[in-house]
Image (cartoon, grey):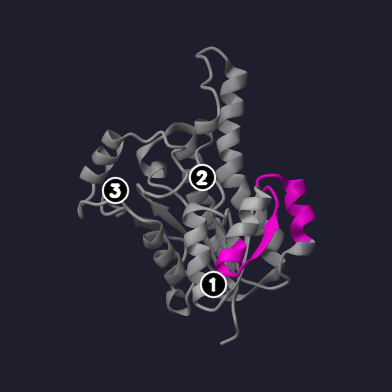
Amino acid sequence: MHMRVVVVTGGATGIGYAVAEAFAQAGDQVVITGRRESLLKEAAERIGAVPVAFDAADPTSVAAALPLLPTRVDVLVNNAGGNTNFDRAEAAGDDLTALAENWRANLDANLMSAVLVTAALAARFTENARVVTIGSIAARQGAGSYGAAKAAVEAWTASLASELGPRGGTANVVAPGLIVATEFFRDRMTDDGVRQRVAATRNGRAGTTDDVAATVSFLASPAAGHLTGQVIHVNGGAYLGR
């Protein structure tokens, strides 16, 4: 089997970093992307990946990065995203313009980033290519514009699975529940918030970035060739995807 070429968006920190590290340790050639160039370069150096800095949600930025991205892609992990509401002021009840901007920010960060990078690289996908997009338990349990954006990712993935299927490719979503040791909550998650989320699991613990990376690694493997168009819930049973 040839060395796989893997692209991981948002690969400098958190889940993306753990995913990229798992592929690198498996001997794959890994490219990580992100907006923060210095952080990206440091992460790439640590795991032996190639850094390519661009904004995955910006079509111009994605197009400009194409010459720097691999000409052959076996695995694409759309991990870039996060809840942009943590970085924005809440819209006042009657400010529809601000409300629209806040919603579009989450749709751009979580849905459009995956759509744009996947479309940009589609012509470079090998036979049996694997696309894994990171979703969220929020797609099923709510969380406003963030949950809606992740729910849209699920619907888009179903269409993508149809497009990739004839060439043996697969497209799936990995939807984590609470994962500790990421920047996701911007240090705003309280101990009580963690306790409540852990209490909702069946196994009594928070998830780790390695839990997610292991699931992504399986979905990217030849063994998972008949698993496509699915949402794999990695949440300790806090939400039952059935």
Which amino acid is tagged 2?
Ala
Mark 3 to mark 1: distance in Å? Answer: 31 Å
> As displayed, is residue 181 above or below residue 84?
below
x then y, percent, for residue 195: 24, 40
- Which residue corresponds to mark 1? 24
**Part of the protein shown in magenta:** 44-66
Q: Residues within 10 Å of mark 2 (few under 14, many from 20)?
A: some
Asked if the stretch drawn in magenta spans residue 53, the answer is yes
x then y, percent, for residue 119: 68, 57
User: Residue at the location (61% across, 52% down)?
Assistant: 39
Asked if the stretch drawn in magenta spans residue 5, the answer is no
Mark 3 to mark 2: distance in Å? Answer: 18 Å
Mark 2 to mark 1: distance in Å? Answer: 30 Å
- Which residue corresponds to mark 3? 239
> As displayed, is residue 214 above or below residue 238?
below
Which amino acid is tagged 3?
Tyr
x then y, percent, for residue 41: 65, 58
Question: For numbered disc 1, what is the local secondary structure?
Answer: helix
Q: Residues within 10 Å of mark 3 (few under 14, many from 20)?
A: some
User: Residue at the location (46% across, 43% down)?
Assistant: 184
Left/right of residue 115 with respect to residue 20 in the rendered view: right
- Which residue corresponds to mark 2? 152
Q: Earlier in the sequence, mark 3 or mark 2?
A: 2
